[in-house]
Image (tube, helix red, strand yellow):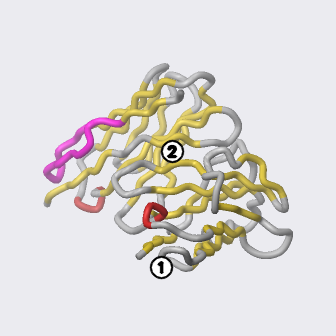
Amino acid sequence: EDQVTQSPEALRLQEGESSSLNCSYTVSGLRGLFWYRQDPGKGPEFLFTLYSAGEEKEKERLKATLTKKESFLHITAPKPEDSATYLCAVQVGDYKLSFGAGTTVTVRA
Amino acid sequence: NAGVMQNPRHLVRRRGQEARLRCSPMKGHSHVYWYRQLPEEGLKFMVYLQKENIIDESGMPKERFSAEFPKEGPSILRIQQVVRGDSAAYFCASSPNVYNEQFFGPGTRLTVL
């Protein structure tokens, strides 16, 4: 069975304190790995798609990387508005997304 | 360009009643997916539909749950005879084809009393 594990469960950062979130996966036939951001009471907001090991994508203070077994989401010099739950999902086959439980990031000013 | 729309945003039902959740995909998107997020759990796939067709309902409970995506109008997730365990956030997502990213709506939060 496909497994997606995110760590840590929660991360408290000081504004400007860079850190990384981990998403490890055990799947057969990975088609893509997705990162989403979810704010309380809202739906997941798409951030990145990664398709192959070695691929990297960046958006503002966020950078996502992918290896054969895991993905990292790096947050550089975070701001309070980066506080959210970050979700990792793997796509196996054509369409089904399997989500991890998420990492809740809190950035203090 | 409006995003994925879901209504109602909040729905309260008593045990045994029916719940109808609606989802309008983004313009140009013909693929719709429903996910459920139980308290303290991750998002779980329920069903994948294209216009007038259910492609995969492997994640949907066999009893009481059904989904449709008619030729005209929104996709509907229907839960009959709701029980307290159905209380959750239900999210709809859409994509222009199966190989693209899925964009999520704001969700419907169902509370069963």
Which residue: 49% across, 74% down? B15
Dot 1 amino acid type: Arg
Residue at (49, 79) in percent of width and height: B13
Provide the chain ID for the residue under circle 2: A
Identify the chain of the residue marked 1, using the numbered disc in the image. Answer: B
Residue drawn at (17%, 53%), measured in percent from left and top?
A15
Q: Quadrant of residue A22?
A: top left
Residue identified by numbered label 2: A48
Secondary structure beneath disc 2?
A: strand
For the N terminus of chain B, which image quadrant?
bottom right
Residue B94 against residue B99 in the figure, above or below: below
**Which quarter of the picture shows residue A39?**
bottom left
Residue B101 in the image: state x and y as whole percent.
62, 48
Mark 1–mark 2 distance (CA, rounded to whole Å): 39 Å
Residue A20, picture quadrant: top left
Residue under the point 61% across and 57% down: B34
Please tell me which residue lies in front, A49 or B85: B85
Q: Is residue B35 left or right of residue B42?
A: right
Label 1: which residue? B14
Number of marks = 2
Image x and y of residue A7, in percent: 30, 35
Q: Relative to residue A29, is residue B41 drawn left or right?
A: left
Q: Which residues are magenta?
A: A6-19
Q: Nearer the viewer, residue A93 or B41?
A: B41
Q: Secondary structure at mark 1?
A: loop
| Amino acid tagged 2 | Phe
Q: Is residue B66 magenta?
A: no
- Of discs 1 and 2, which sits in the foreground? 1
Measured as percent of width and height from the top left, residue B11 is found at 49, 79
